[in-house]
Image (cartoon, rainbow, N blue to C red):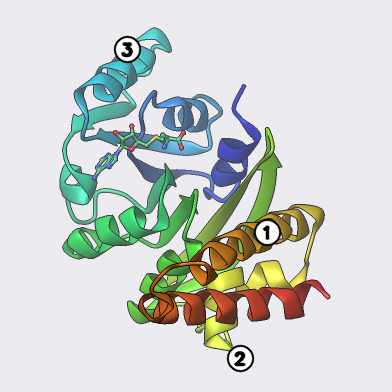
Amino acid sequence: KLSKRLETVTSFIHNGMKIADIGSDHAYLPCYAVRKGIAKSAIAGEVVDGPFQSALHQVAKTGLTEHISVRKGDGLEVINPYEVDCIIIAGMGGTLIADILERGKSKLEGVTRLILQPNVGAENVRKWLYHHNWQLIDEKIVEEDGKFYEVLVADFGNPAFPYKNLEKEFLLGPFLLQNKNEAFIKKWELELLQWKNILSKLEKAVDRAKTNEKRKEITKKINIVREELE
Ligand code: SAM
């Protein structure tokens, strides 16, 4: 059984796709997707030895060594152009996900779908997609064990999402904004609280001038989110 978070990620894989799961850790996702007959084959990529060994172990245990190739390496360097249809990067920060995509741009040749699940900073992922001709086609937000997870799906070559207010939609997600579910509201209420805390600490700083930029930035975000929660 897969976590709700990884199940949501998996739900966006088209039947028969060849997938690569980058930063696969225990390789639960590729094992599940191949075993259920959703993915035709999979590559599980890992840069750290511990998780890499654990992926190898899990794939062997599930009897899927013929269908899942476990590879050690940094980001997209473990895949060849045109080898997969769909790349999944889940359970990392948005800055790291955007960085992996940026550094591995040449490997995206032939890839039609990206499924990305940033734990924080989804804003950076949306920005990267927007600037590299990847069209956001769907988003989900789920709550699991008191944490909130955003799943972003992007296809190459689709008509661009008609963004109306880039700053707001990058931060909150254009699709998530269309249907503000309970998880969405709870996540942003929590973020608001945290930003207000940071702000009040910055206000008390000895040298207030030094915190000007940061305070401006947070205040702007607070205003954007507040407007949407009202
Ligand atoms: N994707 C799984 C999930 O969502 O449950 C595992 C998430 S785990 C928190 C993040 C994994 O990404 C770690 O195992 C880490 O070693 C791996 N990772 C971090 N940076 C990476 C990179 N540049 N290339 C490949 N793997 C990376």
Q: How far apart, in angstroms, are the residues tagged by discs 3 and 1?
A: 42 Å
Amino acid type indicated by mark 2:
Lys
Amino acid type indicated by mark 1:
Leu
Check the image and name the residue furthest to the top: 61
Is 17 displayed left or right of 141 in the figure? left
Mark 1: C-beta under 8 Å from nearest atom of ligand 1:
no
Q: Which mark is residue 57?
A: 3
Q: Nearer the viewer, mark 3 or mark 1?
A: 1
Q: How far apart, in angstroms, are the residues tagged by discs 2 and 3?
A: 47 Å
Q: Quadrant of the N terminus?
A: top right
67 vs 5, nearest the viewer: 5
Residue 211 vertical position relative to residue 64 in the rendered view, above or below: below
Residue at horizontal 53 percent and vertical 37 percent from the top = 38
Q: How far apart, in angstroms, are the residues tagged by discs 2 and 1?
A: 27 Å
Check the image and name the residue furthest to the front: 206
Using the rendered view, name the quadrant where residue 140 is placed.
bottom right
Q: Which mark is residue 193?
A: 1
Mark 2 or mark 1: which comes first in sequence?
2
Determine whether the residue tagged by mark 1 lies in a helix, strand or loop: helix
